[in-house]
């Protein structure tokens, strides 16, 4: 459709004609996501023209059609200048029933009437929110104007009336809050301190997930017969979790925050017990819950296992391990997927690592499943289908973050003991962690753990003298290649090897390294002549 015709009609046509014209444009471009650069100026003028129509007193059906046009145009970040203005953002904020800037009183009156609005008026609100999401996402200028007109205040005011929301109104209000808090880190503090967004989002989750409290920070267990969470509730919950993730990225101490974080942890524990209508969506919402749990202070994680009303396992001090088991199952699913480890696996590994580091019961429970007492040591640690085998394989993954996360998790399960770690992984798989920690010479990490001893099986004790410490398993006897050589041949081969290493070293292909007394790596010549060993000694 010719944009010049639309532009000329916008100035002179009546409301019905404008609506008919724009509806045709929307129909033709509903699935358009890449636009002709030659028409940028015309599309920018169309944005301005549509905003002018929205500024008049037109019927909801015409408003909805104009907003649909603006939503399509807002997919192109190069034409948003007319919208990314105070006037443009206030128009959209008013249509979205947000108390933004100087139109706050008028919008507040509209918000109070939201439960009586017609379906057509509700579609106007939804389309305005969709436009705001696109504009804020695509335009840094619009992000700044959003701050200037206090759009965050309007969003939080809307959050306070979440119980009256229709699904799409709630979904796109939460999405806009997520986008604003993601793209403008400076707004997060304002949202937390001035507009109490963390508390409002927590209350929204509590309402959406139908949390029923049976004790301090303990929600009633949904039970095996509980119905799956409806798809719409799940969608809104995920948007709220994403917004909360942004708002909890920075530390802010205090008793009030501690109470709020423990409340969030309890709600997230409840969420981990819930299922949605599909396994894929269940995994997705649990992933968002795990991301948020990682942001909470580790001192709040006791809420996951301390549920007195439901009770727990005597062997683990009466602590309830249901949530920990769900996290272990989630970790295994993500490992078995075999892709996207960085975003999909490392958050749950990090959460389990910190939980194990600070809570003895969590560490003991996880270790019993992930690193049970060794029996068969004839197979390399990285070969097999057990959780231990899978995690050891990840210790040599190409992605540094994945490799470090898997190694750190196993190291903490071993109470940061190098000897214990090598028993389960072999020196070769653990070398990267030991280099990074300066523990090549052995020893322990800095964290203090309980003194309960790990008992070895009889099978392991009998096989231990024959285990290759590098590979971590008992190898089949190999023929000795120098057994039948004469002493002269052995000396010749040794000298040949030395010459090869020397040549590679001089050409900087390799650099021989040694281990200092403190366990860190250094060039070989430094470790052979360490000045710290010679200090204070007398020369003969």
Image: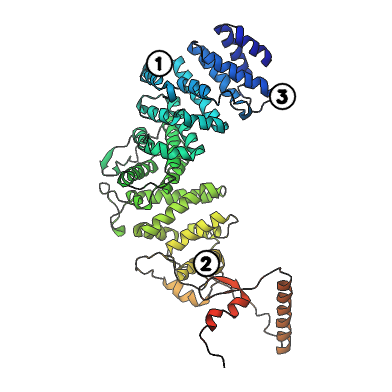
Neighbor class of circle 2 (other Cα within 10 Å; few <14, some 14-19, many 20+) is: many
> Separation of disc 2 and disc 3 at Cα?
58 Å
Question: How far across and down, in percent of the image, does residue 50 sit?
Answer: 57, 16
Does the image show residue 157? Answer: yes
Question: How far across and down, in percent of the image, does residue 363 sit?
Answer: 38, 59
The image's colouring method is rainbow
- Whichever of callouts 2 and 3 sits on the residue coming sooner in the sequence is 3
Looking at the image, is mark 3 or mark 1 nearer the viewer? 3
Residue in front for this viewpoint, 16 or 338:
16
Q: Is residue 26 left or right of residue 491?
A: left
Q: Which residue is mark 3?
A: 38
Neighbor class of circle 3 (other Cα within 10 Å; few <14, some 14-19, many 20+) is: few
> Separation of disc 3 and disc 1 at Cα?
41 Å
Q: Are marks 2 and 3 in contact (CB under 8 Å)?
A: no
> Separation of disc 2 and disc 1 at Cα?
64 Å
Question: How far across and down, in percent of the image, does residue 428 sit?
Answer: 57, 67
Q: Secondary structure at mark 2?
A: helix
Q: Which residue is mark 2?
A: 434
Q: Quadrant of the C terminus?
A: bottom right
Residue shown at the point (42%, 47%) measured from the top left: 295
| Res 539 quadrant in image | bottom right
Q: Is residue 80 left or right of residue 58?
A: right
Q: Is residue 135 left or right of residue 318?
A: right
- Whichever of callouts 2 and 1 sits on the residue coming sooner in the sequence is 1
Question: How far across and down, in percent of the image, does residue 239 sit?
Answer: 45, 35
| Res 139 quadrant in image | top right
Q: Are marks 3 and 1 in contact (CB under 8 Å)?
A: no
In this rendering, is residue 203 above or below 131?
below
Q: Which residue is mark 1?
A: 117
Residue shown at the point (33%, 42%) measured from the top left: 260
């Amino acid at each position: 459709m010719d944009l010049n015709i639309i532009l000329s009609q916008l100035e002179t046509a009546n409301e019905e004609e404008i609506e008919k014209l724009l509806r045709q444009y929307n129909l033709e471009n509903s699935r358009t996501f890449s636009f002709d650069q030659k028409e940028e100026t015309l599309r920018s003028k169309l944005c301005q023209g549509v905003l002018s129509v929205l500024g008049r007193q037109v019927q909801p059906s015409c408003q909805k059609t104009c907003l649909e046009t603006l939503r399509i145009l807002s997919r192109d970040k190069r034409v948003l200048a007319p919208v990314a203005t105070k006037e443009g953002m206030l128009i959209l904020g008013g249509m979205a029933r947000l108390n933004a800037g100087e139109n706050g009183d008028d919008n507040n009156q509209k918000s109070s009437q939201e439960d009586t609005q017609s379906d057509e008026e509700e579609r106007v609100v939804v389309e305005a929110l969709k436009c705001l999401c696109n504009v804020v996402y695509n335009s840094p200028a619009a992000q700044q104007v959003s701050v200037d007109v206090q759009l965050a205040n309007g969003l939080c005011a809307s959050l306070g009336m979440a119980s009256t929301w229709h699904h799409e109104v709630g979904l796109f209000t939460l999405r806009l809050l997520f986008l604003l808090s993601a793209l403008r880190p400076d707004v997060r503090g304002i949202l937390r301190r001035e507009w109490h967004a963390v508390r409002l989002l927590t209350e929204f989750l509590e309402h959406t997930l139908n949390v029923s409290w049976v004790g301090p920070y303990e929600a009633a267990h949904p039970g095996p017969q509980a119905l799956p969470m409806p798809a719409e509730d799940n969608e809104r919950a995920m948007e709220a979790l994403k917004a909360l993730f942004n708002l909890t990225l920075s530390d802010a101490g205090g008793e009030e925050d501690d109470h709020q974080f423990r409340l969030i942890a309890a709600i997230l524990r409840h969420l981990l017990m819930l299922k949605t209508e599909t396994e894929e969506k269940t995994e997705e919402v649990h992933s968002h819950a795990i991301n948020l749990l990682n942001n909470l202070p580790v001192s709040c994680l006791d809420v996951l296992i301390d549920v007195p009303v439901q009770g727990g396992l005597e062997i683990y001090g009466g602590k309830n391990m249901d949530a920990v088991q769900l996290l272990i199952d989630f970790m295994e699913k993500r490992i078995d997927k075999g892709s996207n480890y960085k975003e999909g696996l490392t958050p749950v590994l990090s959460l389990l690592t910190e939980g194990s580091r600070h809570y003895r019961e969590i560490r003991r429970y996880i270790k019993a499943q992930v690193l049970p007492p060794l029996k068969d040591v004839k197979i390399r640690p990285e070969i097999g289908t057990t959780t231990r085998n899978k995690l050891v394989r990840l210790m040599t993954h190409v992605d540094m973050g994945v490799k470090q996360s898997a190694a750190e998790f196993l190291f903490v399960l071993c109470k940061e003991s190098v000897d214990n770690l090598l028993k389960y992984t072999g020196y070769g798989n653990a070398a990267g962690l030991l280099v990074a920690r300066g523990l090549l010479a052995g020893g322990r990490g800095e964290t203090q753990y309980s003194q309960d001893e790990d008992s070895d099986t009889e099978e392991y004790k009998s096989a231990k003298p024959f285990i290759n410490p590098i590979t971590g398993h008992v190898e089949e006897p190999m023929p000795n290649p120098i057994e039948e050589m004469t002493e002269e041949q052995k000396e010749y081969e040794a000298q040949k090897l030395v010459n090869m290493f020397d040549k590679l070293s001089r050409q900087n292909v390799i650099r021989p390294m040694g281990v200092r007394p403190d366990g860190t790596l250094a060039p070989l010549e430094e470790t052979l002549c360490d000045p710290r060993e010679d200090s204070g000694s007398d020369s003969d």
